[in-house]
Image: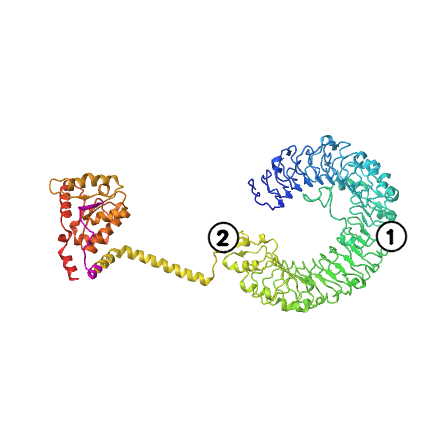
Amino acid sequence: MNITDGAFLNLQNLRELLLEDNQLDKIPTGLPGSLRELSLIQNRITSVTKKNTSGLMNLEYLYLGWNCYFGNICNKTFDIEDGTFERLTNLKVLSLSFNNLSHVPPKLPNSLRELYLSNTKIKNITQEDFKELRNLTVLDLSGNCPRCFNAPFPCTPCERDSSIQIHPLAFQDLTELRYLNLSSTSLRKVPAIWFDNMHHLKVLHLEFNYLVQEIASGEFLTKLPSLEILDLSFNYIVTKYPKYIEISPNFSNLTSLQILHLRGYVFQEVRKEHFRPLMSLSNLKTINLGVNFIKQIDFTFFQHFPNLTVIYLSENRISPLVNDSLQNYTNGSAFQSHILKRRSADFEFNPHSNFYHNTNPLIKPQCTAYGKALDLSLNSIFFIGQKQFKAFHDIACLNLSSNGIGQPLHGTEFSAVPHIKYLDLTNNRIDFDDDNALRELPELEVLDFSYNAHYFRIAGVTHRLGFIQNLTQLRVLNLSHNSIYTLTEYNMNSMSLEELVFSGNRLDLLWNAEDRRYRKIFKCLRNLTRLDLSFNNLQHIPDEAFLNLPQNLTELYINDNRLHFFNWTLLQHFPHLHLLDLSRNKLSSLTNNLSKFSPSLRTLLLSQNKISHLPSGFFSEASSLIHLDLRFNRLKMINKTTLQTKTTINLAVLELGGNPFDCTCDIGDFRRWMDENLNIAIPRLADVICASPGDQRGKSIVSLELTTCVSDAIAAILCFFTFFITVTVMLAALAHHWFYWDVWFIYHMCLAKIKGYRSLSTSQTFYDAYVSYDTKDASVTDWVINELRFHLEESEEKNVLLCLEERDWDPGLAIIDNLMQSINQSKKTIFVLTKKYAKNWNFKTAFYLALQRLMDENMDVIVFILLEPVLQHSQYLRLRQRICKSSILQWPDNPKAEGLFWQSLKNVVLTENNSRYNNLYVDSIKQY
């Protein structure tokens, strides 16, 4: 993408400019001084100069990261001119991450609040680099001299795997720092002097380093009284699998610590005595021990952390607490193959998120909202014993997903944790065989049984869901993606259930046309308000099954099925329905009585169907709708009749992107409707584009020029009028070409008969002849002057007095006046014709004036000399050859005939044309 310099200069009110991922190789100059935010990430910019930032005195946010890294290789050093940012006195945020820098840019403005220098190949931090940046609150130096072992991206460590070199006093001026990221800088030691002046530091990231010894000693921990979040993840020693973790007693000085991440330390057993320094931290709420390959754990030690709300033990090797053989079913021999995994399962190359740690919550917020949470997902707890959770009697949120649990639940397994309100058992192999399952959890409100399809796929196995009616507080049940196609009971019962997710099952088989047993499967869920039936392979919904859905439904999801038809009339049986999702089906039509069938419906989602038109008056009959999604259908036109409304509509959001609109003049009604209803938002309006005609393909519908469009009636009138004018002009041209001279001659002859002939009192003849010729043609002029004039004026016999333009015209007099005077004062007018002169305006004017004397004075004064064969098809010339042939002389081709030519010319000039008329024509004219 090329942007010319000064392209944005006229946008004087521009506050924010995003030019991300555009392959720019330089910063555009001439940017408006009003800019507050400028983002140029993911381009190919490798230098920044004072000129680039001049005039940007109001700039507060500047993002120049990701311009030169492993995914956007530039093979250049990112060059920053000395003092480039010095004059940006309002700059608060500067991001230069993932660029090929070699040092911290000098002379940074002291207004800076956040500075991002991650993965910039900086090896040394000097005492002067952050001098006087007293307002800095965020500093990111991660990825400089990175720890490259197991890196899931191209990674180049510093020489001999050395760490980043930071001067002991480099941070002495950062008194307001709140966030410091030193992840993946190959640190082996964290000097306590760095933090002497960081009294307000709250977040410290030290993951992906070599700090096992620092975790065990940790003098720097005594200098962080305000620290709230500490991340020491993935500092393991390569090829080592110690039995215990060593934690420094200095951790007890982190009195404000709330969240501690210790993922990837990699050790075998958790014992209370090893975590004793943490037990005195009264503010500690979250402890993260995930991805440590822990095999044995004394759960009771968590009882010494009275304020813990999140205990994260995911991705370990914790086994069922049944007997010693189960506890020790694994050994350390498998360690090597597992520790060589990629760093994080949630890793993404996203320039807008943290590169080295996941910024998402460890556990779903919906789960932790209920209280104390325990996450044991991705372990090896394939069997739940009665003592498994004895140490967690007060937990309200329990995640046991992806543990391979295959046992049937009999109502005793969770008796040690009776206060659980949110239970996640996804991605297991639970056998639903007992109606007493989970009876021990009377307070359970949310139950997630999704992705437990193992036994549901086996025909003949007991599939009971009757336990649901015993859970009197259950509000949300997720049974999605279980491939349920048969059940032991034919219906589900619950008086408390409000939301059921039944997506990813086989309702197409349960509601088979020949099998009526499951038509009322959801009828007894009396208080159900939200039902998800997506991904059930439905091609048809039996009316009986639909009518037996709970009538209190407010949200119904039937998306991602294969429906060709939907019976809209059945919606009248659901008076509270607010949302209906029919996206990604194969529907081709809509009802024109939506408000009649479902007056409560507010949101209708119909994206990715096959709808090609909207019924007449649809918006009028869907007046209750607030949100309508019609994206990626087959709409080519929204007709005027569709848009007509009799009542006020409440529509606020209309989604239309991805439809193949036919952008002819007929779409003008919809465009005008859009302009008249500005209160209706059309998200991503730029994606509402034309598919036809060819010259409009790919253009946004809002960019169409419709000013040339007219109505059909006006178009028909204009077409007829244009046709009439065209035919008239063509006929007139043909008539002029064929009959002009005949009509002209007859008209003037009749006019002369009526008026009679008269002599002009002003007409006095001084010359025998006026010679009209092409004065611009040198050869013709030479012939007239040296031949014609000589033979007529200087002959030995009677001379002829000629009037010549170049000799006898009065200077200063208008051309038309000279011409008229010359013709009127001459007895004859001689026209010396060539092909070029026959088309000349001067000839035509002189000819009309000479012809006028015939009409007005009954004097035929015209004589033609044809130097070239011209006017071969002229009706006048043909007529004149018949009436007075001697007045048309042609320059002879034979030089011996020239004498005869001159004698004939002199005779014509000196005698009247009337005496030379053909008697046959003269008599016929007289008779007329």
Quadrant location of the N terminus? Answer: top right
Query: Where residue 769 sits: x, y (%)?
Result: 18, 46
> In the image, which residues are magenta?
751-772
The residue at the far left in this view is: 797
541 in relation to 161, above or below: below
Tell me which residue sits at (68%, 59%) in the image.
534
State the residue position of label 2: 694
Where residue 419 is drawn, which disc sits there?
Answer: none
Q: Nearer the viewer, residue 240 or 227?
A: 227
Residue 233 sits inside the magenta stretch: no
Question: Is 311 or 767 nearer to us in this picture?
Answer: 767
Q: Which residue is identified by label 1?
A: 390
Q: Identity of the amino acid at label 2? A: Gly
Front-lying residue, 883 or 42: 883
Decide if residue 634 is in sight here. Answer: no
Give the quadrant of residue 568.
bottom right
Q: Is residue 69 left or right of residue 874?
A: right
Q: Pick the residue in front: 766 or 63.
A: 766
Residue 138 shows in this picture: yes
Crowd rating for badge 2 (residues with CA inside 10 Å; few <14, some 14–19, many 20+): few
Circle 2/circle 1 CB separation < 8 Å: no
Badge 1 element? helix
